[in-house]
Amino acid sequence: MSVINQSRTTVRSGVELDIDRFGPHFGAQVSGIDIASASDDQVRAIRAALVEFKVLVFRGQQLEDAEHIEFANRLGDLTTGHPVHDSGTDVPEQMYSLDSADNGFADVWHTDVTFMERPPLGSILRPVVLPPTGGDTNWADAELAYLSLSEPVRGLIDQLTAVHDGNREFGYYLKHKRGGKGNTWDGREVTELTPVRHPVVRVHPETGRRAIFVNPGFTSHIEGVSDAESRGILDLLYAHLTKPEHIVRHRWQLGDLVLWDNRNTLHYANRDYVDFDGGQRRIMHRVTLRGDIPVGLTA
Ligand SMILES: O=C(O)CCC(=O)C(=O)O
Ligand SMILES: [Fe+2]
């Protein structure tokens, strides 16, 4: 990740963190912390920084799955790795393994698991195998994108509700690869993916700030408007969310650990390494923190 400004700053929550911001709005690298031996005060400061900066990068950590999970457990309650994806028996059930050799890619802008009623609060990701170059991950700031819309368009979308449907991505997989038996999510075994409704503008439960909460990965349509209007509004929001000014990009190294707030960001992993030199492999391990039911302005 290129550092746009050099301003070192600290978050005030009992302990100072060495923060190098990626730009004026969101994203930061945190230095000087050993995740595996972080103190309670440091963990509290990281939790506060996650809300402040939305995307946090730690380098040089070299964690195993168990340490990755242990750290996540200190930040919040964990979900299972994924509602339907089977990451195999080599990883703990809280871990989602995304392996390019197993067709695991994330080259569609999305927010994690918004097709469930209670999407994760945040995600914590580390690379296990990386290609020599490529496979960078990008995040978009959906709060900044909301703020940079014109006031009349904000007023329009404030009122709207969208439907999120996991069948588009995982329906076939759940039915035919898993025989209709997914994983446990939010205390229930997932046997089908019933579309869910979420506000198009989500109010962040910790800051009260508004963010655009639709994504091309899982949002199927906007309710109560025509198909053409739904497509038009979603296309407008997707083009706006993914403007370069709203994005930070991370170039991975082994030993990295990245946390993001999944309530007000989208992300996209570049699939640019696969077609070169006969294909390179990339494996990422993720755990997700249990979130709340998204709330809009009129709920
Ligand atoms: O592979 C990546 O960089 C991101 C994968 C992804 O979408 C996720 O872990 O939620
Ligand atoms: Fe994701």
Image (cartoon, rainbow, N blue to C red):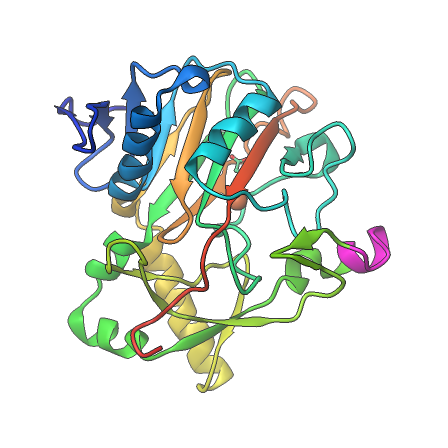
Q: Quadrant of the N terminus?
A: top left
Residue drawn at point x = 62 percent, y = 26 percent: 282
* Above/below status of 264 relative to 116: above
Residue 121 is situated, as x and y percent measured from the top left of the image, at: 44, 49
Please identify the quarter of the rendering in which residue 209 is found. bottom left
Nearer to us in this view, 26 or 4:
26
Q: Does 175 sit above or below residue 286? A: below
121 displayed left or right of 271: left
Q: Position of residue 189 (x, y in %)?
A: 73, 58
Q: Which residues are drawn in magenta?
A: 173-181
Residue at 21% in and 25% down: 15
Quarter of the figure with the C terminus = bottom left
Q: Position of residue 173 (x, y in %)?
A: 77, 54
Residue 250 position, x and y percent, is 39, 29
**Residue found 77% across the figure and 35% down from its top:** 88
Question: Is there any visible trace of residue 126 in the rendered image?
Answer: no
**Can I make out residue 231 in this image?**
yes
Side of 114 where 28 appears, left or right: left
Q: Quadrant of residue 74?
A: top left
- Residue at x 53%, y 28% (from the top left corner): 70
- Which of 115 and 81 lies nearest the eye of the viewer? 81
In depth, the one of 152 and 66 nearer the eye is 66
